[in-house]
Every structure is written in C-alpha cells, then in structure tokens.
Image (cartoon, helix red, strand yellow):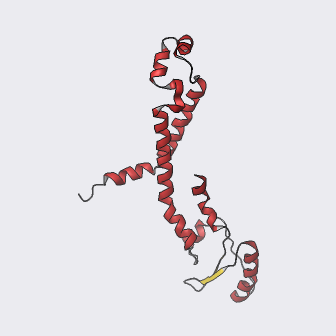
C-alpha cells in the first residue's frame, strides 16, 4: 500500500532511535542499582530470613540472580541491537567522508567544520597558496588543492582520517 510505512522500516527506525538508547541505558542503570542493593545468589532460606514475605516476589522477578535473569539479558540484547543498528546506519556516511572527502568548500561545509581558519593575505593567491602548502603538510598531511565555483582556491589537508572508524572498533 503506498503511503503506509513498512513494518521493517519502522522496526529499523525504532532500533536506530536515540530515545531507545537513552531508555535502555537508564533501565540498565536502575536495575543495576537493584542488583547492587539486593544480595545476589543467596539461598531461598536466606532470602526468607532477610526479606520475609517479599522473598518470593524477589525470586519470582529473578532479582535474586538479576544479572543472569532472562529480562536483564533481554535488556542487554536490546542495547546491543540498538548499538549495532546505529553503527550500521552511520557507517555509509562515515565511509564516504573517509574515502571521498569534499575538497571544495562551500558555505555549508565551512560552517560544519570544527577546525578551520580564514586568512587575509597581503599577497597574491598563488603566493599565499605556495606559503601555506608546506605549513599544512607539516601540521596535517600533504594538502590537496582545488578551485571552487567562484575560482577561490581550497586547500584540503587531513590527518588520521581513518580515526573516524575508532568508534566502530570500540563498540
């Protein structure tokens, strides 16, 4: 049916959601507090002595061995699915950025860059370019020179571009 979102698409959107990440992390943190406060792996008699009537409820909810409970493992599994989905969703854009960087700077690209410098040079464009290239080479890498749509010169130098994949290795 046109216009109706596919079920797999909405599942993918759900798994890639930052809200899911935050909710899962908060639930894991809250339940981990319970697992710290409630002694784990005691005998039924010890729980009965310590918690009285509430001992059966604790055991029914698997709070006596919480970190091995089905619901806690499911929560961790959901977090893993969320992490993998988010990583896979971002991977193509990261791959494009690393393998095919934008070498001509337009206004939108310049605003998005965290490390950028604009210089006013009292010399010609060719002379300024010749002076900047060795500096960029020492600080970053051998710069690539391109010409923008308005004939402006763009020098693109980047170091450690594959470091963008560090998050994937870490996760």
Tell me the quarter of the picture where residue 140 sits.
bottom right
Residue at (52%, 69%) from the top-left corner? 96
Taking 130 as reference, is 64 left or right?
left
Q: Nearer the viewer, residue 24 or 65?
A: 65
Residue 128, percent from left and from top: 73, 84
Q: Against 151, is 86 above or below? A: above
Residue 133, percent from left and from top: 72, 81
- Give the number of marks: 0
Taking 8 as reference, is 20 left or right?
right
Residue at (57%, 32%) from the top-left corner? 32
Could one spot residue 18 in this view of the protein?
no
Q: Nearer the viewer, residue 117 or 65?
A: 65
Image quarter hosting the N terminus: bottom left
User: In this view, which residue lies farthest toward the left?
Assistant: 1
Tell me the quarter of the picture where residue 105 sits.
bottom right
Q: Against 112, is 132 above or below? A: below
Residue at (47%, 53%) from the top-left corner? 85
Residue 122, percent from left and from top: 75, 84
Residue 35, percent from left and from top: 57, 28
Could one spot residue 51 in this view of the protein?
yes
Q: Against 126, is 101 above or below? A: above
């Amino acid at each position: 049916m046109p216009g109706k979102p596919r079920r797999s698409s909405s599942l993918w959107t759900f798994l890639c959601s930052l809200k899911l990440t935050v909710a899962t992390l908060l639930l894991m943190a809250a339940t981990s507090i319970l697992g710290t406060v409630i002694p784990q792996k005691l005998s039924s008699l010890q729980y009965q002595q310590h918690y009285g009537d509430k001992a059966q409820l604790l055991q029914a909810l698997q709070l006596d061995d919480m970190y091995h409970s089905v619901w806690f493992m499911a929560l961790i599994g959901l977090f893993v699915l969320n992490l993998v989905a988010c990583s896979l969703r971002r991977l193509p854009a990261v791959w494009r950025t690393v393998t095919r960087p934008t070498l001509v700077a337009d206004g939108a690209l310049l605003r998005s860059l965290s490390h950028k410098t604009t210089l006013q040079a009292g010399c010609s464009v060719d002379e300024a370019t010749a002076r900047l290239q060795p500096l960029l080479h020492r600080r970053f890498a051998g710069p690539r020179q391109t010409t923008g749509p308005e004939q402006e010169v763009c020098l693109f130098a980047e170091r450690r571009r594959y470091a963008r994949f560090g998050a994937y290795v870490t996760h």
